[in-house]
Image (cartoon, helix red, strand yellow):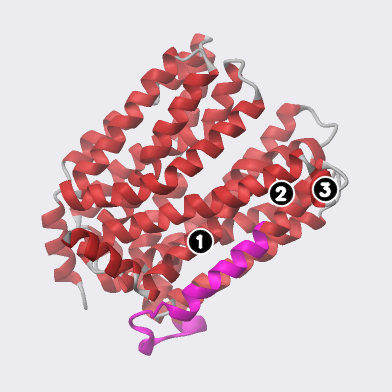
Amino acid sequence: MAEHKDARGILGRREVLSWALYDWANSAFATTVMAGFFPVFFKEYWSAGVDATVSTFRLGSANSIAGLMVALLAPLLGAMADSGGAKKRFLFFFALVGVAMTGSLCLVGRGLWGLAATVYIFAVVGFSAGNIFYDSLIVDVAEPKEMDFVSALGYSVGYLGGGLLLLLNVAMTLKPSLFGLSSAKEAIRLSFLTVALWWALFSVPIFLYVRESGVSAARLGWAAAGAGVRQLVDTFHHLRSLKVVMTFLVGYWLYIDGVHTIIRMAVDYGLSLGFEANSLIVALLITQFVGFPAALAFGKIGERIGTKRAIFIGIGVYGGVTLWGYFMDRVFEFYVLAVAVGLVQGGVQSLSRSFYARIIPRDKSAEFFGFYNMVGRFAAIIGPFLMGWVGAATGSPRLSILSILVLFVAGGVIFFTVDEREGRILARELEGE
């Protein structure tokens, strides 16, 4: 009964709901744009008439460039935000970039793949860099004992918001005449604009109602950049004594690489088994809507049995999904696996975020989340390469999916050695230095 009261108390706080709504806002970009329509439109419209392997290379290059830009900038941006007391300012800037670039995609004409790729790169940078500061603001809206639930709440509403807009956008493409549109292509172009408007509208509460600690010491311009560089150098020095954080980041990198590989390669794997594209889109929607309540439930599981144990459960389920994927031969089984992934995907991501937030200094949260997001950007490097290499070497897509087990096992073993209690003590000792 007390747990229900605690949850109601947390949900009744305006700053918590405002923080979570940003996930609702920007998840529309992750679902409709990144996972859904941009890859299809890039191949069939902006790269029309080009060999499929060429358009795939162009799209992969765009994603790699965006990821590398964020990965290289993330620690410095975080350090600048912390030293300048400017997490919300940085979030506003990168959200604005993401919104503007996403909306601009609807204006890019047929065949202009270079322009489309460039606009997309900056949209991804806005989305990914903004998440550094969004993640770091969790320490300003939640106490340590609340972080599992609050982090899960963000992912949960993100799944729901992203899924709802994706459902609308899919309906627009399947039945464009019902929406007063002339074709599916027009519907897809309009979907980019709907994502931009959705992202902008639901971002407003976080800027109005979330109060950032430390803003009295705000620095701007070159002063913030200089202070950020100095703080970044200082953080590298601190990381020597924060071995718990380093160990966690290595383990996280491996198992989250497996998670991201499943997300990005599942559709490709399903196609290689001969499943229809429409069936795979249905599976994507299933994962989104299962993920909404499941992420929230996982937050409560983390509070009840411990964050570390709950993450292990998620890693174990992913291992089972990988094994089942090896034997799968029916679309129905793909749907079942979509449900299984939806049950744990948000949980693993949200609890990893809250676990990390508890073992880092609160007054350096943006900086340390810069490293966290850098690791996230470099994730899904080993997995896709491993799948491609094993598939090419053996000629079997089934063996390629089985190879991802290595990431979950290795990441789980390293994560097992992380001592949360020691990490929290060391982090508190470094606060205020």
The residue that mark 2 highlights is 117
Quadrant containing the N terminus is bottom left
- Image spot of residue 143 (x, y percent): 24, 69
Asked if residue 30 lies left or right of residue 3, the reply is: right
221 in magenta:
yes
**Secondary structure category for the residue under label 3:** helix
Q: Earlier in the sequence, mark 2 or mark 3?
A: 2
Q: Is residue 409 above or below residue 358?
A: above
Tell me the quarter of the image containing the C terminus: bottom left
Secondary structure state at the residue bearing disc 2: helix
The residue located at (24%, 47%) in the rendering is 301
In this rendering, position of residue 411 left or right of residue 394: left
Which amino acid is tagged 2?
Ala
Pair 2/3: label in front: 3
Rendered residue at 22%/38% (across/down): 414
Inspect the image, locate mark 1, and give the three-letter code of the amino acid beneath it.
Ala
In this rendering, would 121 be left or right of 261?
right
Q: Earlier in the sequence, mark 3 or mark 1?
A: 1
**What is the number of the mark on residue 129?**
1
Residue beneath disc 3: 186
Q: Tell me residue 96's x, y (percent).
A: 61, 69
Whether tag 1 and tag 2 are in contact, CB under 8 A, the answer is no
Q: In terms of image quadrants, where is residue 379?
A: top left
Furthest-front residue in view? 1
How many labels sit on residues?
Answer: 3
Question: Magenta residues, as a range?
Answer: 195-223
